[in-house]
Image (cartoon, rainbow, N blue to C red):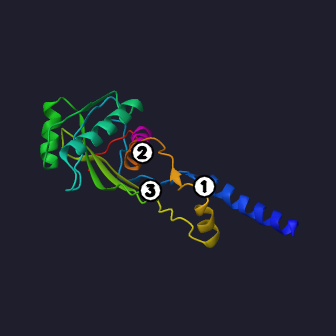
Amino acid sequence: MKIKITMVVLLLLGVVVSGCAKNLRPPVQAQKGAPVVYIRPLTDTYRQAKLGVLPFHVPARMSEAQGIGVAALFKDVLLGKRTFPVVRQLSSPYGDYAQAVEIGKANDCDLVMVGTLDYALSGGDLGGARVGVSVRLLNVRTGNTVWYVSQGMDQPMDYPDTGMFNRVADSFSMPAYRSSNGAPAVTNMLTRIAVDMAEVFVGARYVTDR
């Protein structure tokens, strides 16, 4: 009888310990796609180019200020990666590429970056964040596209295990939670995409207008 009682106690103890162990769940890791390069340079022309980064176009539910914030993030990453010797942020709004080029000329730039945040979903505690970005670098002299790159990231959903063992374990423990892992998922994703694109520009700084 004592042996049976001991086994039951050990089993319950194991449930409690396992339940406590899952209180701190690791953040859901995002799955990053590689940058897709549609247009890239072929000759070394703009090694010393001055780049202006314009506000990103964002989905309708987002504000112009958020588009400026995305541009600031890309500008900081491009400067940190030394992608071009001069990278400055241009806050003037624009409608089309022709207007973007005129803003670049007025600010003494050789290239302007026009970017679009195609989608940005923040997700929730179980993951589900998604980000998609496309970027063009335009020659302000000709108006032609020098680089055209897009990239997306997805954070898979991490549904909890609702099996019998885990339901029993949950009854002996505090609710599970996740560490913040720093900035919100969308900001982390945008930063990683900006780094990838900067490395694309550094690794292929050659230009053929198309």
Q: Is residue 3 left or right of residue 209?
A: right
Q: Quadrant of residue 205?
A: top left
Q: Please name the amino acid that badge 2 sits on.
A: Asn
Q: Please name the amino acid that badge 1 sits on.
A: Lys
Neighbor class of circle 3 (other Cα within 10 Å; few <14, some 14-19, many 20+) is some
Residue 69: within the magenta? no
Q: Please name the amino acid that badge 3 sits on.
A: Asp
Image coords of residue 137 (percent x, y): 28, 43
- Residue holding disc 3: 125
Image coords of residue 82 (percent x, y): 40, 30
Front-lying residue, 143 or 43: 143
- Residue holding disc 1: 22
Q: Quadrant of residue 170?
A: bottom right
Label 2 to label 1, Cα distance in Å?
Answer: 24 Å
Label 2 to label 3, Cα distance in Å?
Answer: 15 Å
- Residue holding disc 2: 188
Vertical placement of residue 89 versus 22, above or below? above
Quadrant in which the N terminus appears: bottom right
Disc number lying in front (2 or 3):
3
Q: Earlier in the sequence, mark 2 or mark 3?
A: 3
Q: Is the magenta stretch mostly helix, strand or loop?
A: helix
Disc number lying in front (3 or 1):
1
Q: Which of marks 2 and 1 is nearer the N terminus?
A: 1
Q: Which residue lies furthest to the bottom in this view?
A: 164
Q: SS at mark 3?
A: loop
For the point 65% across and 69% down, the residue is 165
Q: In this view, does 147 lie to the left or right of 176?
A: left
Residue 196: within the magenta? yes
Mark 2 and mark 3 residues within 8 Å of each other at the beta carbon:
no
Image coords of residue 133 (percent x, y): 33, 52
Vertical placement of residue 65 versus 122, above or below? above
Q: Where does the magenta region start and end?
A: 195-203
